[in-house]
Amino acid sequence: MAPPGPILRMRGIGKRFPGVKALDGVDFRLLPGEVHALMGENGAGKSTLIKVLTGVYDIDDGEMELEGRPAAFSSPLAAQQAGISTVYQEVNLCPNLSVAENIFIGREPRRLGHIRWKRMRHRAGELLHRLDLDLDVSAALSTYSLAVQQMVAIARAVDVEAKVLVLDEPTSSLDAGEVAQLFRVMRRLKEQGIAILFVSHFLDQVYEIADRMTILRNGRLVGEYLTSELSQVELVGKMIGRELADLERLEGRPLARETGPLVEARDLGRAGAIEPFTLTIHEGEVVGLAGLLGSGRTELARLLFGADHAGTGSLRIAGEAANLRTPRAAIHRNLAFCSENRREEGLVPDLTVRENIVLALQAARGWTRPLPRRRQDELVAKYISALNIRPADPEQLVQNLSGGNQQKVLLARWLILEPRLLILDEPTRGIDVGAKAEIQRLVAELSDGGMAVLFISAELEEVLRLSHKVGVLRDRRLVAEVDNDEGLTSEVLTETIASGAAS
Amino acid sequence: MTTMTVPGLGALPRKYVPILVTALLLAGMFLAGGVRYTGFASGQVILNVFIDNAFLLVVAVGVTFVILTGGIDLSVGSVVALSTMVVATLLKDGWSPWPVMALVLVIGTVLGLGMGAIIQYFEIQPFIVTLAGMFLARGLCYVIGTASIPIDDPAFTAFAQTRIDLGGDLWISPSVVVAAVVVLVAVYVLHFRRLGRNVYAIGGNEQSAMLMGLPVARTKVTVYAISGFCSASGGLLLSFYMLSGYGLHAAGMELDAIAAVVIGGTLLTGGSGYLLGTVLGVLVLGLIQTIISFEGTLSSWWTRIFIGLLLFAFILMQRLITARRR
Amino acid sequence: MTVSPTSSGPLTLLRHRLFWPVVILVALLLLNVVFTDHFFSIEVKEGHLYGSLIDIVRFGAPLILVALGMTLVIATSGIDLSVGSVVAISGALACLQISDLGDQDSVGGVLGAAGVALLLSLVLGAWNGVLVAAVGIQPIIATLILMVAGRGLAQLITGGQIITVNSSPYKLIGGGYWLTLPFGIIIVLVVLALTAFLTRRLALGLLIRSVGGNAEASRLAGIGARGVVITVYTFCALCAGIAGLMISSNVSSADGNNAGLWIELDAILAVVIGGTPLSGGRFSLGGTVLGALIIQTLTTTIYSIGVPPETTLLFKALVVTVVCLLQSPAFRAKVVRRRRPAGVSPVAEEKVRVHA
């Protein structure tokens, strides 16, 4: 195939926000019929570049060409009309409208301004069929899973006669099967000559689907590479500017199981969320939970923490029967739960770093017994430096921090309570590699210090690296409990997840 | 929305349940009234509810548009009063009826447009902006005059006294026809025009609507303009009904309108609800008044207590329905 | 989500937020000086403080009270539309009981009446709180119920009449003096001190802001959000109940229909003018007091500069719009600074930053 000219070319792109230079002289090009990955840590400028490209932000410096002609978009609509469509990480559709409408709203088939519903539903059905999806197009979007909603978003993006399709972390909430389906769709679109810009934190996925990649660091261009010519280790090195050693050092940890059981769940379950399961966690033990998205990992954790009510079974904590009706009760039993959904279930954006950190402790004391300010400052300063939270300003609003630092603030909130069991649900998702390594090291240290940790992660390597024992979930059932010894590899785990039985 | 329902679980889609509940309640109230009071169960009683509440219906239609986008409009009652005041004053000054009506509609629309523009472009909460609009319109009434001004324009009195016979001793006023036309046009716009679909989309998720390239700003401003237009129309109908202009007319009507919309099953968070529900909501409010007037011995404050209790019952019912289906 | 100026601590931010309300209040006061001689003079007559400034605070006392309660409610991202009705109910119940007393001047009887009225206010507030926190009804709707039904209830209590009382102990609450100060001002100071104590010295403020900022995160952090919300609505109704006593005491009568009419709107305005966003998560007690004073000063000003009182509402609309515009970051960005030509959309920027 003769190398075609780029369909999109950006030169010397610069974008400033008050106090920050988000993009600085970035060059970027996109060829028709390729999947191009945009790589970089959080804060490297990926999102900003995408928003500049799609007309959400205006450009401060530099120029952009679409099909050889200078282009600048004042709004997402203008970009869309020029052929650049975007599907964001969070599905940006309207859950209250029907599937068909979500695909066609803004360009409904009309006659004299009258919307032709029948024709619209028909065309929506056809379009989804081409993407191997068979949905009731007149049902409300909210009746479908997130993954399906994502596909609907792509169907919408594709139907606008897109030349460029931007997929901003589309896979972060999909399970393996759904990712495969998405990739099928992407390959089909690629064959049609559409240029796809793909952003993902999952390196394996990038290597599976992307032809080329552009790497950004701190708002600057690192370079553009063919995927086949750059190894994963080199890629990570270029993204973070340092070696992977931090991640490797945790291997080979001793088992610690001499102490008695801390938490014993017996036939604990909740209809529609998770089948009754039995699980024992010892002090100082890291129990990993592996399984696909939607396999019940989060649901299991929420039952242990009392975030949802258990319908069946019993729970004993440190030998005593416990009936956890609320998170409050769980906290009084020295349990802590760091939710996977930082923004909705973790942070209080309008509070400062200090206030976010002391929140759980203050809640446990009740509002009539305030934590003295001096004590607050001591505790907060201690954890800011221990966890390396940046900026190290306790009075900064937490919403101004990066994702990784926000995650550390939430960890600090729970560590301050000195819990006996810390439940971490996807603590490393969506944060950069550096912060990831720090959080993994912290988990290891905590368990060495006697704290039990329930560690949930979609990345099997991470689960294997940290856990003493791995629980495998599948279809909302705990199907296996495996000791993490020499014989357990990510292949074996994958096999277990896929087959649903311990090997 | 993270709730999941299995498609096709019930024969009736969940989105219609609130409306059905309102319809059943309405039927129940009518039946109860019919059993308890002689002369209640007649078609004319229902028609009278329409006749006495035509202006409220028109106003509530505009409020429905605003609420569907997730906004709120507190200014409607004052705009209604201002409209009656402008009509009465200008007619007294010798203007002919048609230009007066046109002017009133323009004033209402422009007021709505202005509020919408401030809400959208300066990002101030609708509650506050329309509250200021409420003070402004009510203030303008008092600037025009503090006393009630009678309307004796022949065209207006003729319109007010016209009866449209439906046969069999049943009749309606022209206002009912106007209200019906407004409702039908609004239903058409909401379901078969881009504007209407954009209204629902914005109520569902405003940021998504923006990223999907929908004209969010224009739609939101338009919605407030529509509400202003409907309030002015409601004001015209009220001046036919009252044959006077007065700064104290329609005091608290914004609450009646919002209550009607809520009783009709529309969620204040936007994106969910139907105009039919609003119509039923207005009828429920009207029927309460009727029942209380039939009761005769009940004091007027019972109306408020009843409306309050009814609101409570309704909202509780909606909560229970959504909770059970979750 | 509101956009806050980057890289500024909460202290400068707070100062920043109250800057425009202070300017407006000072401007209104200065305007008065032009029209009224000795506007700023405060004198002592017969052991009582007199002066225009004192009058503004005295007449504004009920509004300040209601607005203080409203501030906490709004900080939990709620709203309470029912305070006007609670004002009417509280005044009506107190006056009804006092009018039934054999000796209306009996201090014990008046205290009992006031106590029962405040107790009912607490119950009504708890009712609102339960509807919002336990049943899960939107605050605006939940309190709309009591707003509508409460007026009826107040009229039910008064029997549709205006109950007049002639009780000197009761008169003290709204119209009397104590330690040279109008008693109303003392009540306001006590309630303000109590609120500040609860929210700043105790941790109620932190929990309120947390619940208002992110309710689910607060629940998972172990905050008893229900308790906090119910407490806040109950406190708000208590403030309204006290205001109701003041208002009815000041005129020695209870009018179920008109007492406290639209005071909820004025209170919400005062809160917003004072820089507390309706979206919750933040609040400023000082700002609220300022806001209430602005509204009261406006009313006083209109009388003193000789503008017909009919236009009060117009000026109110004007001042509200001006203050809100001045405080709106979007307005400042677009109109005041004129950083860049029109056509670009900073609106989009701010909205999208939410998930950046």
Image (cartoon, grey):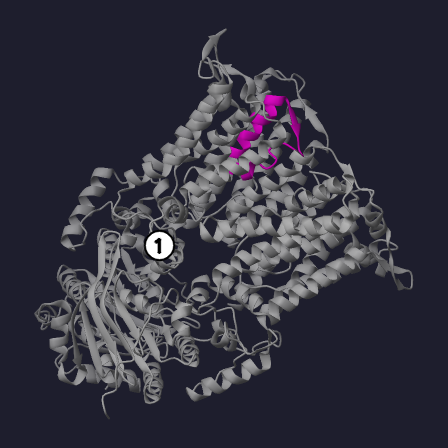
What residue sits right under mark 1 in the picture? A329
Query: In front here: A92 or A83?
Result: A83
Identity of the residue drawn at 13% across and 81% down? A230
Residue at the right extreme of this rendering: B168
Residue C240 pos. (x, y %): 53, 34
State the SS at label 1: helix
| A125 over B280 or under it: above or below | below
Residue C349 pos. (x, y %): 35, 58
Residue C10 pos. (x, y %): 29, 41
- Callout 1 crowding tier (Cα within 10 Å): few <14, some 14–19, many ≥20: some
Whether residue A259 is visible: no
Identity of the residue drawn at 28% across and 58% down? A336
Amino acid type at image mark 1: Ala
Question: Looking at the magenta stretch, what is its main secondary structure?
Answer: helix
Residue B76 pos. (x, y %): 63, 48
Query: In front here: A427 or A421?
Result: A427
Which image quadrant is residue A250 in? bottom left
| C205 over B215 or under it: above or below | above
Instruction: Check if residue C146 falls in the magenta segment.
Output: no
Q: Magenta part of the protein: which range?
A: C239-267
Which image quadrant is residue A72 in? bottom left
Residue at the top extreme of this rendering: C46
